[in-house]
């Protein structure tokens, strides 16, 4: 029995504080805010877009991981949390895949 395996180079990054940060104008309104709960509250950290672009040229794929506590605590819905995760990927300049779609590309 022969099984073909696909070799994938994968880097998994936590989103908050690793790839993105809260926008300064949001922090001015909500001091101490740790993670974004709504669209438009985050921006990529300085240099992230360029570094990920360089890594991606070598065929590396990226996965984003996050533990959105805002859903459990009622700060945002699951749907909004998914949109914020997608926004983080777009802000960081990486292609966004849902887990079930990752190996289809």
Image: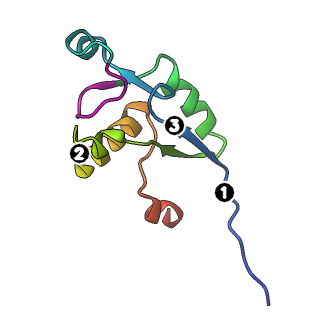
Nearer to the camera, 18 or 3? 18
How far is mark 1 from mark 2, CA to CA?
A: 30 Å
The question of residue 9 being in magenta is answered with no
User: Mark 1: few, some, or many residues within 10 Å (few <14, many ≥20)?
Assistant: few
The question of residue 36 being in magenta is answered with yes
User: Mark 3: few, some, or many residues within 10 Å (few <14, many ≥20)?
Assistant: few
Furthest toward the top, the residue is: 28
Mark nearest the camera among 3 and 1 is: 3
Q: Which residue is mark 3?
A: 14
User: Mark 2 falls on what kind of element?
Assistant: helix
**Is 55 displayed left or right of 86 in the figure?**
right
Q: Which residue is mark 1?
A: 8
Q: Are marks 3 and 2 in contact (CB under 8 Å)?
A: no
State the image coordinates of residue 103 (x, y, percent, origin top left): 53, 64
Nearer to the camera, 18 or 76? 76
Instruction: Tell me what residue is drawn at x 48 percent, y 27 percent.
Output: 49
Question: What is the chief secondary structure element of the magenta stretch?
Answer: loop
Vertical comparison of 20 with 89: above or below: above
How far is mark 3 from mark 1, CA to CA?
A: 19 Å
**In terms of image quadrants, where is residue 92?**
top left
Nearer to the camera, 21 or 10? 21
How far is mark 3 from mark 2, CA to CA?
A: 18 Å
- Comes first in the chain, label 3 or label 1: 1
Instruction: Tell me what residue is drawn at x 32 percent, y 26 percent.
Output: 42
Q: Are marks 3 and 1 in contact (CB under 8 Å)?
A: no
Q: Which residue is mark 2?
A: 80
Which residue range is magenta in the image?
A: 33-42
């Amino acid at each position: 029995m022969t099984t073909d395996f696909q070799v994938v180079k994968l880097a998994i990054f936590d989103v908050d504080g690793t790839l993105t940060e809260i926008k300064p104008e949001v922090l001015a309104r909500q001091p101490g805010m740790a993670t974004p709960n709504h669209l438009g509250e985050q921006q990529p950290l300085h240099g992230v877009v360029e570094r990920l672009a360089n890594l991606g040229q070598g065929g590396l794929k990226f996965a984003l991981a996050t533990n959105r506590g805002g859903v459990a605590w009622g700060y945002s819905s699951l749907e909004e949390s998914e949109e914020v995760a997608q926004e983080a990927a777009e802000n960081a300049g990486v292609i966004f895949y849902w887990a079930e779609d990752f190996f289809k590309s």
